[in-house]
Amino acid sequence: MPLEEITFEAEEKMDKSVSFLRSEFRTIRTGRASPALVDGIKVEYYGTSTSLKELASVSAPEANLIVIKPFDASCIKDIDKAILASPLGITPNSDGRIIRLVVPPLSRERRQQLAQQIKHMAEQARVSIRNARRDANKQLDLDQKDKVLTEDERDDGKKEIDELTKKYVGQVDDVLKAKTDEIMEV
């Protein structure tokens, strides 16, 4: 396998790890209302598990309020049930046409729990990045052993992989710091 292909594959895996972490962080509650908080909610609609986004428009008109307006008013009870069953921990208020979710401010203890949770998630992303580095280095060693690459090419490839690892671990650290700051702000 050519050197460029190995580094490209490693970079792609590392980038996916950071992207996945960002998408996971969007679903973490920070005390501020965001439509992303309800992104993962699945609603049982006519016997089919359907995402909330497909059944309703979701907006956050205020810093502590999420408004869900179903396209079909008959599914409002199903949406209520799905929100109550979700790990969100917010009780929906419904008037028969729209659902309001009042996002309460987080307690200091809950903020610290969330900060620990996102640190754990960030560490998983770092491990994933390091695994991509390990796999790439293993492939470089194998290709050098099979005489596809010279020792110098292998060493250059390992340096490049290490630089990519530092770059993507740095991105994970930046994303973690931003989310931690967002959670801990009072």
Image (spheres, helix red, strand yellow):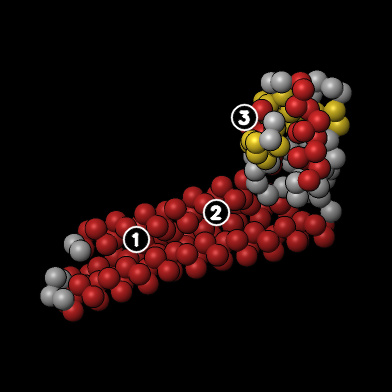
Seen at 29% across and 65% down, the residue is 160
Q: Which residue is mark 2?
A: 21
Using a 10 Å C-alpha cutoff, classify the residue at mark 3 as few (fewer than 14 neighbours), some (14 to 19) or many (20 or more): few
Considering only vertical position in the picture, is 172 above or below 186? below
Estimate the spatial distance between the alpha carbons at disc 2 and disc 1, rounded to whole Å.
Answer: 17 Å
Estimate the spatial distance between the alpha carbons at disc 3 and disc 2, rounded to whole Å.
Answer: 24 Å
Q: Amino acid at mark 3?
A: Glu
Considering only vertical position in the picture, is 77 above or below 109? above
Residue 28 in percent (x, y) is at: 68, 49
Residue 161 in percent (x, y) is at: 32, 66
Quadrant where the N terminus is found in the figure: bottom left
Q: Is residue 74 left or right of residue 95?
A: left
Count of all numbered marks drawn on residues in the image: 3
Going from N to C along the chain, the mark reached first, 3 or 2, is 2
Q: Are marks 3 and 2 in contact (CB under 8 Å)?
A: no
Seen at 75% across and 46% down, the residue is 86
Going from N to C along the chain, the mark reached first, 2 or 1, is 1
Q: Are marks 2 and 1 in contact (CB under 8 Å)?
A: no
- Residue 65 visible somewhere in the drawing: no
- Residue 19 visible somewhere in the drawing: yes
Q: Amino acid at mark 1?
A: Ala
Residue 10 circle label: 1
Q: Amino acid at mark 2?
A: Leu
Which of label 3 and label 1 is nearer to you?
Answer: 3
Which of label 3 and label 2 is nearer to you?
Answer: 3
Q: Which residue is mark 3?
A: 54
Going from N to C along the chain, the mark reached first, 3 or 1, is 1
Considering only vertical position in the picture, is 100 above or below 20? above
